[in-house]
Image (cartoon, grey):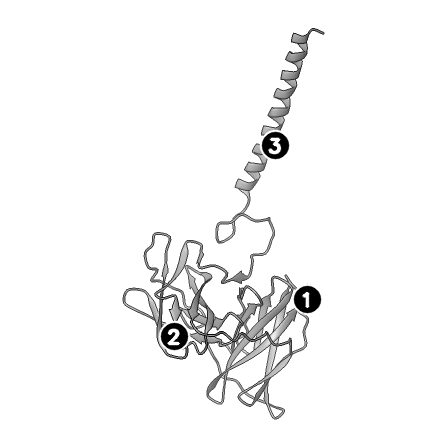
C-alpha cells in the first residue's frame, strides 16, 4: 500500500470516529434539554421527589429578598423592613394566604438561638415591615416564608449585630423539654433521611394533658432547621393535634421550634432531633 493510500484510509477512519462522537454528544444534549423541569425550572432526574429544603439562598425562581439594612443594634428595637423583588426588579405585591398569614418572617441566630416568628405588615409601596429586637451580638438568619401563585417559597439573608459573640453549642438530641412550666414531649419515632416522618407532640403539666388552642390555622406551628447551613424545612401541620409531617433531606441534627397556644399564651418549645441515614 502506498503512503498516499495509507493517509487516505487514516483520514476516513478519523471522519467516522468524529461523526460518532458528535452523535453521542448531540444525543446527550437532547436528553438534558428534554428532561422534566421542577418548579424552579431546574432539570432533574425523572421520578425524583422535589427537594423539601428551602431558605438556602436570597434569590429563587426569579424572586429576591431585599432587606433595607444589613445590620442591627444589639438589644434595641428597630424596624426590620424588606421587600420581595421580581425578576424585573419590581416589588411583588400579591401573596397567597399560608397558615392564615400572607408573610411569615423567621429570625434566628446562626447558632440557632434567639428564635423569633414574626408577622410583618405590608406597606403601601408593597414592602414589609415589623418591629424586631435582636438580643445578642452575632449573625442572624432572616427567612421570608411566603407563597406566590400557589407556590411556597422561602428566601433568606443575614443580618449582623456587632459585639462580642458568645456562640452556644447545639443541645444534644432529646425527646422532651420544659417551657413555661409545661412539658413538651416528642413521641418516640425514627426519622430517616429522604422519607416521610411524623412528628407527634404532647403537652402536659404535672403529668396531666394540657389543651392547646388553634394557632395559625392549626394546633401548632413547627419550624425545622438543619444544623450547619440552617436549611429551612417545609413542615405540614395536622389541624386537630400537635402532629406534623416532614421529610428530612439528609442525616444529621435538626433544631425543632414548636409554637402553640396554651392558657391564652404563645409558647415556643425547642428540641434537637437526630435523623438517621
Percent x, y of residue 232 = 52, 66
155 versus 210 height, above or below: above
Specify few, some or many for label 2: CA neighbours under 10 Å numbering under 14, 14-19, or 20 or more. some
Percent x, y of residue 130 = 36, 74
Badge number at residue 126 = none
Residue position for label 1:
276
Q: Earlier in the sequence, mark 2 or mark 1?
A: 2
Closer to us: 275 or 217:
275
22 lies left or right of 189: left
Outermost residue, left direction?
A: 124
Specify few, some or many for label 3: CA neighbours under 10 Å numbering under 14, 14-19, or 20 or more. few
Outermost residue, front direction?
A: 164
Residue position for label 3:
24
Picture residue at 46% right of the left edge, 70% below the top: 140
Specify few, some or many for label 1: CA neighbours under 10 Å numbering under 14, 14-19, or 20 or more. some
Picture residue at 57% right of the left edge, 39% below the top: 31
Does the CB distance between marks 2 and 1 fall below 8 Å?
Answer: no
Outermost residue, right direction?
A: 1
Mark 3 to mark 1 CA distance (whole Å): 40 Å
Mark 2 to mark 1 CA distance (whole Å): 39 Å
Name the secondary structure under disc 2: loop
Badge number at residue 73 = 2
Percent x, y of residue 235 = 54, 69
Does the CB distance between marks 3 and 2 fall below 8 Å?
Answer: no
Name the secondary structure under disc 3: helix
- Numbered disc in front, either 3 or 2: 2
- Where's the C terminus, which quadrant? bottom right
Name the secondary structure under disc 1: loop
Q: Which of the 4 quarters of the picture holds residue 49? A: bottom right
Q: Earlier in the sequence, mark 3 or mark 1?
A: 3
- Where's the N terminus, which quadrant? top right
Q: Which of the 4 quarters of the picture holds residue 72? A: bottom left
Amino acid at each position: 500500500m502506498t503512503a498516499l493510500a495509507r493517509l487516505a484510509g487514516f483520514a476516513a477512519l478519523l471522519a467516522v470516529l468524529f461523526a460518532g462522537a458528535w452523535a453521542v454528544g448531540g444525543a446527550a444534549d437532547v436528553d438534558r434539554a428534554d428532561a422534566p423541569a421542577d418548579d424552579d425550572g431546574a432539570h432533574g432526574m425523572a421520578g425524583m421527589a422535589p427537594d423539601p429544603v428551602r431558605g438556602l439562598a436570597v434569590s429563587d425562581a426569579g424572586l429576591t429578598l431585599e432587606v433595607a439594612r444589613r445590620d442591627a443594634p444589639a438589644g434595641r428595637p428597630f424596624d426590620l423592613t424588606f421587600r420581595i423583588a421580581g425578576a424585573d426588579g419590581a416589588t411583588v405585591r400579591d401573596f397567597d394566604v399560608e397558615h392564615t398569614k400572607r408573610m411569615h418572617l423567621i429570625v434566628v441566630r446562626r447558632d440557632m438561638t434567639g428564635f423569633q416568628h414574626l408577622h410583618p405588615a405590608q406597606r403601601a409601596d408593597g414592602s414589609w415591615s415589623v418591629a424586631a429586637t435582636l438580643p445578642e451580638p452575632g449573625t442572624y438568619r432572616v427567612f421570608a416564608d411566603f407563597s406566590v401563585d400557589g407556590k411556597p417559597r422561602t428566601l433568606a439573608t443575614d443580618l449582623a449585630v456587632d459585639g462580642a459573640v458568645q456562640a452556644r453549642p447545639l443541645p444534644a438530641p432529646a425527646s422532651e423539654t420544659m417551657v413555661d412550666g409545661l412539658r413538651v414531649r416528642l413521641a418516640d419515632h425514627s426519622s430517616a433521611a429522604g422519607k416521610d416522618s411524623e412528628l407527634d407532640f404532647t403537652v402536659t403539666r404535672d403529668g396531666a394533658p394540657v389543651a392547646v388552642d388553634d394557632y395559625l390555622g392549626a394546633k401548632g406551628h413547627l419550624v425545622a432547621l438543619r444544623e450547619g447551613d440552617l436549611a429551612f424545612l417545609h413542615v405540614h401541620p395536622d389541624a386537630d393535634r400537635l402532629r406534623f409531617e416532614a421529610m428530612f433531606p439528609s442525616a444529621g441534627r435538626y433544631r425543632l421550634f414548636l409554637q402553640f397556644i396554651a392558657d391564652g399564651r404563645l409558647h415556643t418549645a425547642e428540641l434537637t432531633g437526630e435523623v438517621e441515614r
